[in-house]
Structures are given as C-alpha cells and as structure tokens.
Image (cartoon, rainbow, N blue to C red):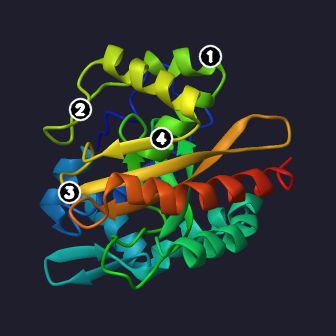
Amino acid sequence: MSNPSLETSDKPKVLVGSLAYGLNIIMAFDRANPRMTLSQVSEKTGMDRAGARRYLLTLAHLGFVIQDGRLFQLSPKVMELGYAYLSSVPLSDKAHYYLDRIRDQTGFPVALGIRDGLDIVHIASANTDEFSSPALTIGRRFPIAYASAGRCILALMEKAERDTLFKKIRLEPMSEMSISTMDGLRKQLQIIRKQGYALVDQEMQLGIRSLAVPVFNTKGKVVASFNTFTFSSIVPTEKLISDALPAMQAAAEEIQTALI
C-alpha cells in the first residue's frame, strides 16, 4: 500500500500513517466524484485495493462512509469534522450578525471567506431567495488568485507574505476571461489596494460576477473578506457596486473592533 503524499523525505517520525490514509480517503470524494467504487478510490488515493478496502470499511463502521453495493460515498457525519473546526473559529460566530445585515440591506447573498493555503474557504454565509444571485455555500473553496475574496486578502496582506504565496501560485484560468499571467494578477492587486475592494467579472465562471471587501483585525492585519456573487446578465456592475459595496464596507469596518 502506497500513497505519494505520505512518501516524502521530510515525513516526521511521529506521523500516524493510519490516520493520514483515512483522511486521504475522505478527501478523495469531491463534487466530481461523490460516489466511487473501491477501484476508483484506490486509483485516486494511490493505495492498493486491499488497503483502500480496509479503510473504507473502517470509515463505514464509524459512520463516515456509506456503502451501496459496489459504490461508496461520504455520509452527513463527515460534516461534523468541518463544523468542529468552524465552531472553534470565533470569527465565524461574530460575523453572522453582519452577514445577515448586509443581506437584508442589499438583497444580495454574502459570505465570509478566509485563506486556507492557496484557497479561499467560506466559513459563514447569509443567503437570499432572490434569483439574481447564486447561493453561497459554507465550506466551498475557491482559488485565491481568482476569487474576489482571495484577491482582497492577497492585495492587502503584508508584502513578504504575499511574495511567499506568489512563489506557490500556479495560474489555471477558469474561463476565457480569466487572468493568465502573474503580471496581470499583480496589476489587479495594485488596483484593489488603491480602491479598497475587489471586483472579479466572470473570471471564475462565465456569467458570474463577484465583489469583495477586506476584513481587518484591530492590529490592521487582513484576516478575511466579505464577498457576494451575482449573475452578470441580471445585475450590472454599477448596480452591484452602488447597492452592495457601502453596506459591505460599513460591516467590515464595524466588525474590525471585535477582532483581536
């Protein structure tokens, strides 16, 4: 049984292989592969079939995986792992009031995103029944270089930290309108620093436009971002900025006093 992610020269001696393999099994399931056979799990994780089977059956016994004939899928119990983390993050709790307020004032859905490596993750959201915008899902991940929330955080973090991330970012355009060069990304970040917000127009997906403002803590360090999404065919850029930006900026300014 082998897994490339575990076979590194700097693997710590205290690493518990069984736990790592089990987590790799869980993370193998995603939007594109919600249900998989044993062979598919084995191929995707790099584990042999016998090992993958043992871990799948163990996860099934613990209630994290459901088996339906030859197919396996995650159970809702997996959400407990994510919510255990979310519930320990004070920021998500403090943000709910402001998220609801932005949504009620503007009519747009809004989410709070934080950086996790090279991704942005939504840890709280307030959705709307309006058809002019897509729903924002907690736990959803977006590439930091293309998400409006990610660009806000990238633009306003300390230069040394940003330079470190730039060495790791690999641009993979998500639509025909996506920025495809690091110079292009740097120019966008300069604009964001100057205007104080990020607008991403159909770069992550054609037809989707997003707006984000940075959230700072009391020390002036950017720690998150409020962001909203709309359908570009329904909501013009000017309306999105005029209707949503003031409420988002006001909320970001107010929540700063509550963040250490």
- Nearer to us of marks 3 and 2 is 3
Residue under the image location 57 percent in, 47 percent down: 213
Relative to residue 74, is residue 90 depicted above or below?
above
Graded by Cα atoms within 10 Å as few (under 14), some (14 to 19) or many (20 or more), the crowding at tag 4 reads many
Residue 41 x, y percent position in the rendering: 21, 58
Relative to residue 7, is residue 223 depicted above or below?
below
- Nearer to us of marks 1 and 2 is 1
- What is the CA distance from the residue labelled 3 to the residue labelled 1? 32 Å
Q: Earlier in the sequence, mark 2 or mark 4?
A: 2
Q: Which residue is identified by label 2?
A: 172
- What is the CA distance from the residue labelled 2 to the residue labelled 4? 19 Å
Instruction: State the mark number for residue 198.
Output: 4
- Nearer to us of marks 2 and 4 is 4
Q: In the depicted view, which residue is nearer to us: 75 or 225? A: 225
Residue 240 x, y percent position in the rendering: 42, 58
Q: Which residue is identified by label 1?
A: 159
Amino acid type, label 1: Lys
Q: Which residue is identified by label 3?
A: 207
Q: What element does badge 4 sit on? A: strand
Residue under the image location 63 percent in, 14 percent down: 160
